[in-house]
C-alpha cells in the first residue's frame, strides 16, 4: 500500500502533505484492516510536517512525498532538489528553532538521507502500532 504526491514547494504544501499522510493511514486502517495507533498517526503527521517544511525552506522548487506501508511500519520519503544532506545542529540551549531533524530522529525507527542524481531523498520508518513486535529498523526490509 502506498501513496505519493508531488508539490510545487510553496508553504501551502506542508498542510496538504500532513493531510495526505493522515488520510493514507486512515485508509490503511479502515479499508485494509491494518492496525494503526493514534500515536503512530500523530507521529507520521509530525514527521511529514518536519521533512516537508525543511524541503520548502531549504530546497528550491518541487518536492515529492512517498508513503508506503510494509510490515508493521510506514516508510515516509521526501525528495527535494537540494543535494545538501541535512544534519542535526549542535546542542545549544539558547538556539531557537532548527530542531526538526532532532524530532524526526526521535520519532523514527530508522532514518536515511542520501543524494540522488538530482537532489536528495530523506527516508524515515515509523512503527504503525505502539508495540510493533518486529524489526522495523532496516530500511531494506521489504
Image (cartoon, rainbow, N blue to C red):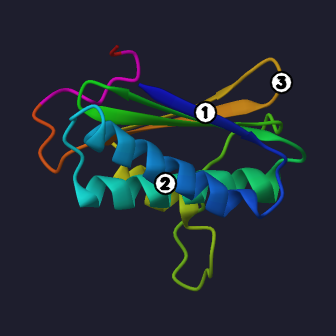
Give the labeled residue for mark 2.
47
Q: Main secondary structure of the magenta part?
A: loop
Which is closer to the viewer, label 3 or label 2? 2
Which picture quadrant has residue 58? bottom right
Crowding near the residue tagged with mark 1, few <14, some 14–19, many ≥20 C-alpha atoms within 10 Å: some
Q: How many numbered circles does the render carry?
A: 3
Left or right placement of residue 2 versus residue 35 in this view? right
Q: Nearer the viewer, mark 3 or mark 1?
A: 1
> Under tag 3, what secondary structure?
loop
The residue at the point 19 percent across, 46 percent down is 129
Q: In this view, does 20 lie above or below 68?
A: below
Q: Residue 18's spot in the image, x, y percent?
A: 55, 57
Q: Is residue 136 left or right of residue 110?
A: left
Residue indicated by mark 1: 4
Q: Position of residue 133 (x, y in %)?
A: 10, 34
User: Mark 3 — residue?
Assistant: 118
Amino acid at each position: 500500500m502506498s501513496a505519493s504526491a508531488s508539490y510545487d514547494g510553496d508553504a501551502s504544501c506542508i498542510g496538504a502533505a500532513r493531510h495526505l499522510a493522515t488520510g493514507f493511514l486512515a485508509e490503511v486502517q479502515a479499508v485494509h484492516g491494518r492496525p494503526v495507533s493514534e500515536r503512530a498517526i500523530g507521529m507520521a503527521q509530525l514527521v511529514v510536517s518536519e521533512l516537508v517544511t525543511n524541503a520548502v525552506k531549504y530546497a528550491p522548487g518541487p518536492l515529492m512525498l512517498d508513503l508506503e506501508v510494509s510490515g508493521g511500519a510506514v516508510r515516509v520519503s521526501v525528495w527535494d532538489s537540494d543535494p545538501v544532506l541535512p544534519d542535526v545542529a549542535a546542542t545549544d540551549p539558547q538556539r531557537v528553532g532548527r530542531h526538526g531533524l532532532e524530532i524526526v530522529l526521535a520519532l523514527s525507527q530508522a532514518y536515511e538521507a542520501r543524494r540522488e542524481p538530482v537532489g536528495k531523498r530523506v527516508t524515515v520508518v515509523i512503527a504503525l502500532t505502539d508495540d510493533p513486535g518486529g524489526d522495523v529498523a532496516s530500511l531494506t526490509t521489504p
